[in-house]
Image: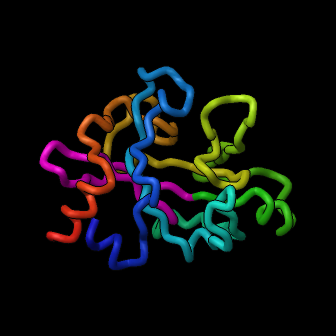
């Protein structure tokens, strides 16, 4: 995690450990974890007001725009997956008609449905994203958004994390 921070990644400011259940899906699908995003690779132009916006179309998984960590019992974080996020507006404005793909698998389309109590787009403007579980086997498949082998049970609140991170 310290290497990620030194390379320009930033922890989700809401300090969420995303689970399928909190996104309105069955709990048995599992979790994602805590997201660390690289603002420059995402092309972020606006922070939540009310949504994160940008012009990012980064699709290079050799240097992904998002790293995903699972909280461990000892308070550390373990890298479990990578993700790339492409803003839908920027993708379309660049002339793309089809969704971005990775190894032939189309990215997932993410947009908030205001009729539901959860924010399906994670406070982002409509976008496409692709998770790749390269550091943790996923029974749901390497490209599934959630992993039943990942848990948020050891997630700590932001204050505890901030204290712990400053001590390292």
Asked if residue 100 lies left or right of residue 97, the reply is left
* Front residue (pair 168, 49): 49
Q: Does the rendering let one see residue 82?
A: no
Q: How many marks?
A: 0
Q: Quadrant of residue 53?
A: bottom right
Q: Is residue 11 magenta?
A: no
Asked if residue 46 lies left or right of residue 141, the reply is right
Q: Which residue is found at the position 50% from the left and 55% from the top?
A: 83
Q: Position of residue 30 (x, y in %)?
A: 40, 30
Q: Which residue is found at the position 69% from the left and 68% from the top?
A: 54
Q: Which residue is found at the position 32% from the left and 32% from the top?
A: 149
Q: Quadrant of residue 139?
A: top left
The quarter of the image holding the C terminus is: bottom left
* Front residue (pair 137, 35): 35
Is 91 situated above or below 101?
below
Is 132 situated above or below 64?
above
The quarter of the image holding the N terminus is: bottom left
Is 1 situated above or below 22?
below
Q: Identify the main secondary structure in magenta.
A: strand
Q: Which residue is found at the position 60% from the left and 53% from the top?
A: 102
Q: Position of residue 105 (x, y in %)?
A: 62, 44
Q: Does the rendering let one see residue 122?
A: yes
Range shown magenta: 65-84
Q: Position of residue 82 (x, y in %)?
A: 44, 55
Q: Is residue 80 magenta?
A: yes
């Amino acid at each position: 995690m310290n290497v990620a921070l030194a390379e320009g990644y930033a922890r989700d400011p809401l300090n969420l450990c995303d689970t399928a259940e909190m996104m309105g899906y069955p709990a048995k699908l599992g979790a994602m974890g805590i997201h660390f995003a690289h603002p420059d690779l995402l092309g972020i132009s606006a922070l939540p007001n009310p949504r994160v916006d940008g012009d990012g179309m980064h699709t290079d998984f050799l240097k992904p725009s998002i790293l995903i960590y699972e909280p461990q019992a000892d308070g550390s974080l373990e890298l479990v997956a990578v993700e790339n996020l492409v803003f839908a507006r920027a993708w379309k404005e660049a002339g793309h008609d089809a969704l971005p793909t990775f190894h032939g698998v189309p990215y997932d389309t993410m947009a908030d449905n205001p009729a539901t109590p959860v924010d399906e787009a994670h406070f982002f403007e409509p976008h496409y994203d692709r998770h790749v579980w390269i550091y943790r086997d996923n029974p749901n498949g390497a490209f599934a958004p959630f992993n039943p082998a990942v848990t948020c049970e050891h997630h700590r609140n932001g204050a505890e994390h901030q204290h712990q991170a400053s001590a390292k």
